[in-house]
Amino acid sequence: MALGFALLACADRMGVDPDLKGEMAESVAAVIVLAAGAGTRMKSRTSKLLHTLCGRSLLSWALDAAQGLDPERLVVVVGHERDQVEAHLNDIAPTALKAIQEQPLGTGDAVRTAMATLGDIHGEVVVTYGDVPLLTTDILINLVAAHRGADNAVTVMTAVVDDPTGYGRILRDGVEVVAIREHKDATAEERQIGEINSGIYVFDADLLAEGLTHLTPANAQGELYLTDIVAYARAQGSRVGAYVESDRWATEGVNDRVQLATLSAELNHRIVESHMRAGVTVIDPKTTWIEAGVSIEPDTEVWPGTILRGATSIATGAIIGPDTRLTDCEVGERATVLRSEATLATIAADANVGPFSYLRPGTQLGPGGKIGAFVETKNAHIGAGSKVPHLTYCGDAVLGEGVNIGAGTIFANYDGTHKLTSTVGDRAFVGSDSVLVAPVHIGDDALIAAGSVITADVEAGSLGIARGRQRTIAGWVQSFRRRGGAGASQSETKE
Ligand code: UD1
Ligand code: CA
């Protein structure tokens, strides 16, 4: 169920709707993803394309949309910060071809580089950008369908926007597109046009290959403009059409961190909404961040300030938050996690975590177990019904079932060189403020007296006690004060 929903949520985003795929009778010959630009406005040492939204890089979102089209070949044009981008590509899309654009001479030059990598190619070529994360496969399928339906040689995806400043404008003659004019090259009159070029297209490969050889940098920016292919096609008597995309987010690129945050919020909003529609109660969608790979079963509650990351899965009946961040965690049915931080932890059914717990990798809390306030765990297996309720460090520990760990217990797992493991048997009881110096084994039903520093094994059913014996000295305080000792009251010292 959990996985089912994950796929559903992703399918929604990636557009792998099987019905729509059916309409794409033939796959396109290639998709070219342009990703060689500099992205200077991010002001980052990290390539813009590696910045993430909702848990995945910009490039990964862009490739998802492209790969969903199932093209015969996929080529990514890399250039700026190429080492970083190529290494990332090897991780996320190892089969994608890479074309290297040595100098950023313009979008026309970038596509020319890709076409050289593709070699002899016929059919349809789709061009998209690596920095447009909300574009989906569904939209690309619609674009290709429009291209085929109108029998175009070029189809441009356009959008009508409130502020077209900076974009290429669409010059039309009825349904046909006559040319695309870059903002910097446009007349005052052309700048009034609100329909803009998204930069996403379908081309007939032969026309594209031929047109690219005719591009010149005779324009305001001295670049080779891919957009000039439109006028070239028209001059050849070929048909150029537009596909107007109404989802304004789908064609929007990320150029700076403000846009990254804006698009992240929109994508998050869509993910959170899809969970709500699938039966998850989200108290405050605005402060809830759920990454794309997270799965949540119905009849769960997510409270404000919760961040669910990576491959986290939440089973039905669970209550998460407020103010909780879970990364790659598994939460069982009816479990609760309140005001806590956890990474690579498993929380079984009916278990309770928090408030203020810190679960580090390798924490496995058994059914009905508890990790409570100000408890840190790491590589800790805590058996069914076992409780670590207060102020404890529990690292490298294996606890059986029904164990109770008293407040302030420390599993001293590090001898300065090695990490060592301690074990605690079923139903054992560790009194408050004890230190278990690893490696020690506490047997089933054993009892550790409060305040003990345990350095040797304690057998099953035994009492382990390791602390100074208490002395009580009758009348000591009075005699101490009589001698004028510290702590005597002021009236007494005046006497
Ligand atoms: C381009 C379009 C413009 C459109 C806008 C949409 C051209 C000439 N103009 O404008 O009509 O409205 O996109 O956002 O195509 N890139 C390379 N190599 C290069 C240059 C760019 O790979 O040499 C890549 C960039 O990484 C980016 C994409 O191409 O992903 C677009 O580049 P960008 O400079 O943002 O395009 P604009 O000139 O703004
Ligand atoms: Ca841009």
Image: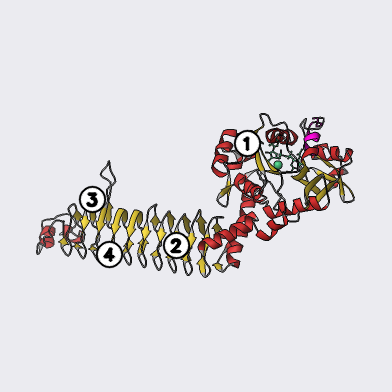
Image quadrant assignment for residue 182:
top right
Marks 1 and 2, Cα distance to the nearest angstrom?
Answer: 40 Å
Q: Nearer the viewer, residue 110 or 133?
A: 110
Q: Nearer the viewer, residue 318 or 20?
A: 20
Residue 55: percent from left, percent from top = 55, 51
Residue 298: percent from left, percent from top = 53, 68
Kind of residue at badge 1: Lys
Mark 3 lies on a secondary structure that is loop
Marks 3 and 4, Cα distance to the nearest angstrom?
Answer: 18 Å
Kind of residue at badge 3: Pro
- Residue that carries the numbered disc 4 in the rendered image: 403
- Residue that carries the numbered disc 2 in the rendered image: 331
Single out the mark in the foreground, 3 or 1. 1
Image quadrant assignment for residue 13:
bottom right
- Residue that carries the numbered disc 3 in the rendered image: 439
- Determine if the magenta segment contains residue 215: yes
Residue 26 marker: none
Answer yes or no: is residue 269 visible.
no
- Residue that carries the numbered disc 1 in the rendered image: 98
